Amino acid sequence: MAIVAEKAKAEPSPAKHRGLIELVRDYSLGRLLVLVLTAGCLTLLIDIRYEHIDVVHETRISWIPLIYSGLLTLLGLWAFLRWSPASRAILFWCYAVGLAVGMTGLWMHSQGAIFSGVAHVLSAWFQHFHYADEPPLLAPLAFCGIGLMGMLACAKVFQPHETTDTR
């Protein structure tokens, strides 16, 4: 009996030594995608703060991507941890706002001349010039991509059958 008790003490608990693969298998693809998108929003927050360091003092609208990516980082983490139909519904609509944020950023970066701005960016394949003083025209479309992927991850139609387990 004492040998069995000692052996039980010596064997590690399976929960303590689970590998990353086992942990990932416990979560749905949508939930994991939200975690990845949340990390992407945090990265955008850091990068945009650096890129907008001067312009935030000139115009208030340049705060929109900073505030949005900061809030989406917090909401994404909250929804990942909670992962309920209600948290996914809230996050779905927050991701939908990303489409408007991205398109507004594209409009602002192109100064309202989207098509000529895109043509200018595409001309870099044929001409060797770069205007460092211009904002990156297509960068705001990252919010559209994050928004669309997040909406797909949270959409009710793509959720596996609901269980009572909240993992």
Image (tube, rainbow, N blue to C red):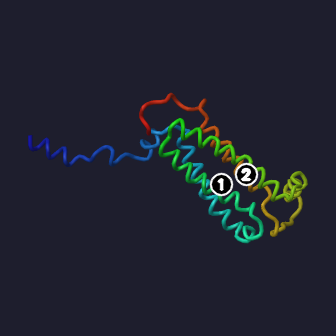
Residue 62 sits in which quadrant? bottom right
Type of the residue with mark 2: Val
- Crowdedness near tag 1: few (<14), some (14–19) or many (≥20) residues, C-alpha within 10 Å: some
Question: Camera-side residue: 25 or 63?
Answer: 63
Q: In what element is the residue under mark 1? A: helix
Residue 64, how many percent across, how many down? 70, 58
Residue 69, how many percent across, how many down? 64, 55
Residue 15 sits in which quadrant? top left
Quarter in which the N terminus is drawn: top left
- Residue at 51 percent of width and 45 percent of height: 80
Report the residue marked by disc 2. Answer: 101
- Residue at 82 percent of width and 65 percent of height: 134
User: Mark 2 and mark 1: span between their CA atoms?
Assistant: 8 Å
- Residue at 64 percent of width and 45 percent of height: 94
- Residue at 57 percent of width and 51 percent of height: 38
Q: Is 47 on the left-hand or right-hand side of 111? A: left
Q: Is 110 on the left-hand or right-hand side of 55? A: right
Residue at the limit of the structure toward the front, as seen here: 60
Type of the residue with mark 1: Tyr
Question: Camera-side residue: 144 or 132?
Answer: 144
Residue 21, how many percent across, how many down? 44, 43
- Crowdedness near tag 2: few (<14), some (14–19) or many (≥20) residues, C-alpha within 10 Å: many
Counting residues from the start of the chain, the first of labels 2 and 1 encountered is 1
Report the residue marked by disc 1. Answer: 68
89 over 122 or under it: above or below: above
Residue 104, how many percent across, how many down? 78, 52
Residue at the limit of the structure toward the left, as seen here: 1
Residue 54 sits in which quadrant? bottom right
74 over 159 or under it: above or below: below
Quarter in which the C terminus is drawn: top left
Discs 2, 1 touching: Cβ within 8 Å: yes
